[in-house]
Image (cartoon, rainbow, N blue to C red):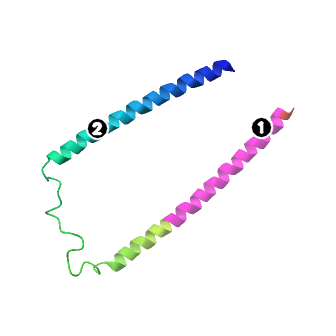
């Protein structure tokens, strides 16, 4: 038992070091990207694009289209929830059957 505890501790320590290295590399990459963005001098600025609320008719331009998109999104969420519940039922049933069969095999 002591052997497995030592192996687990070594693997956990290696995993922790790898995670720290990855997070450090991500931090330096984010800093580099931020510096490039700031030094671009407004290349990515949205001065040339109109503001979404700038026009007098922008508030009521496409309410039917937006409401249709919201309805579609809610229907997709409804379908996805149903599929997730079906998958949950299948996996739960499979796990129960596996546990029952495993208990029957190990009981003898």
Which label sits in the foreground, 2 or 1?
Answer: 2
Q: Main secondary structure of the magenta part?
A: helix
Question: Do the CB atoms of the residues marked 2 and 1 lie less than 8 Å apart?
Answer: no
- Above/below status of 81 relative to 33: below
Where residue 12 sits: x, y (%)? 53, 28
At x 51%, y 26%, the residue is 13
Where residue 35 sits: x, y (%)? 20, 42
Quadrant including the C terminus: top right
At x 48%, y 25%, the residue is 14
Which of disc 1 and disc 2 is earlier in sequence? 2
Where residue 51 sits: x, y (%)? 21, 69
Question: Start and end of the magenta stretch?
Answer: 77-106
Residue 26, numbered circle: none
- Above/below status of 32 relative to 3: below
Secondary structure under the numbered disc 1 in the rendered image: helix
Where residue 44 sits: x, y (%)? 17, 54
Secondary structure under the numbered disc 2 in the rendered image: helix
Q: Is residue 104 left or right of residue 7?
A: right
Residue at mark 2: 29
Residue at mark 1: 102
Mark 2 vs mark 1, CA separation in Å? 49 Å
- Is 100 part of what is drawn in magenta? yes
Quarter occupied by residue 6 = top right
Q: Is residue 106 left or right of residue 11?
A: right
Q: Is residue 30 left or right of residue 106?
A: left
Frontmost residue, 38 versus 43: 38
Frontmost residue, 66 versus 14: 14
């Amino acid at each position: 038992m002591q052997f497995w505890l030592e192996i687990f501790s070594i693997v956990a320590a290696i995993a922790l070091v790898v995670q720290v290295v990855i997070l450090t590399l991500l931090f330096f990459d984010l800093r580099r990207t931020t510096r490039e963005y700031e030094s671009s001098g407004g290349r990515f600025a949205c001065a040339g694009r109109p503001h979404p609320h700038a026009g007098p008719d922008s508030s009521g331009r496409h309410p039917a289209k937006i409401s249709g998109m919201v309805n579609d999104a809610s229907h997709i969420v409804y379908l996805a929830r149903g599929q997730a519940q079906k998958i949950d039922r299948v996996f739960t049933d499979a796990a129960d059957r596996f546990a029952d069969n495993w208990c029957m095999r190990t009981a003898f």
